[in-house]
Amino acid sequence: MNNTLSRDVQMQFMRPAQLEAAIRKFPAVYVPFGLIEWHGRHLPLGNDALKAHAILVKCAEQYGGVVYPPQWLHAGFNLDHLVPVYTELFTRLKKTGFRVIIGVSGHNVKEQITMIEEALEPVTADGTCTGIGLWEVTLSRGDESNTDHAAKWETSNMMFFYPDRVDVSELGEGPIKFDMKPPHGIGGLDPREHASAEVGRRNVELAATAIGEKARELLESLAPEHREFNLPAIAPEHWWMV
């Protein structure tokens, strides 16, 4: 697996005919979630959504489907406002013809998954589409696939996908308490010793594969008449925007 992110599965880069062909082949859409948050001095602030988005692109490259642009609003905002917004988004994706909607958060807290699942509930209630909320490693977690906060795993992911955005030298050479507290705000194993692009590559490979297999399973869980793209076309007569 290489670290190139194909634009052919990213919705914002696709032409209408490409979008229609992708949905007809495998009607799944992946929606990455994250936030702008401290991730040590050595990683980009947008780590969580960048991570989720990149893993989902690798998933779609292998299994099919389409990746929606990253969502930077998160469960730290008032869920009374956010859940209806994302219910509307998921409803529009359903009306676009997607039968499987998978929301994947790179911000590994329970509240983020609760937000996604509550937003999905009214969209999937009629049984004509299905969906799930996941962390990027919910289905792949193990010795070679895991997560943390700006430590071994998240640093490795960024080393694999965006090496020019990582600068471990910013951490210095002195002792660090990996307890999530100031002044470092990092939790996990020391990235100076344990992080590498190869660790990131393997983590991404396992996470992307697990999510893709789940997408297939979810599609097969629908009644046969609800597993196909259900618009006449992606064209102005039948579709305009998500």
Image: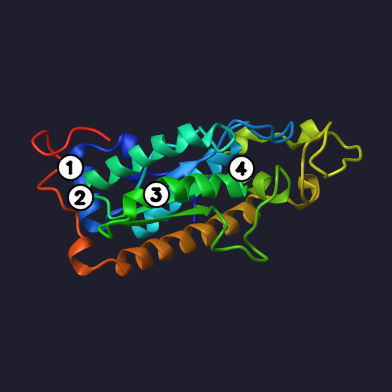
Q: What element carries label 4?
A: helix
Residue 120 disc label: 3
Of 93 and 77, nearer the camera is: 77
- Can you say whether 125 is above or below 13 in the image? below
Q: How far apart are marks 1 and 3 (CA)?
A: 27 Å
Residue at numbered disc 1:
17
**Residue placed most toward the observer, 159 or 20:** 20
Which-is-in-front pick, marks 4 and 3?
A: 3
Identify the mark at residue 158; answer none if there is no mark: 4
Q: Is residue 71 visible?
A: no
| Kind of residue sitting beneath label 3 | Leu
Residue 17 seen: yes
Cα distance, mark 3 to mark 2?
25 Å
Q: Which of marks 1 and 3 is in front?
A: 3
Q: Name the spot of residue 48 as percent of width and height, x first.
A: 58, 40
Q: Which of marks 3 and 1 precedes in the sequence?
A: 1
The span from disc 1 to disc 4 (Cα, nearest Å) is: 32 Å
Dot 4 and dot 3 residues touching (CB under 8 Å): no
Location of residue 241 in the rendering, given as x and y in whole percent from the top left corner:
23, 33
Q: Position of residue 136 (x, y in %)?
A: 54, 53
Q: How many labels does the image show?
A: 4
18 vs 121, left or right, is left
Would you say the residues marked 2 and 1 are in contact, meaning their CB atoms lie under 8 Å apart? yes
Residue located 61% across and 63% down the image: 141
Q: Which of marks 3 and 2 is nearer the N terminus?
A: 2
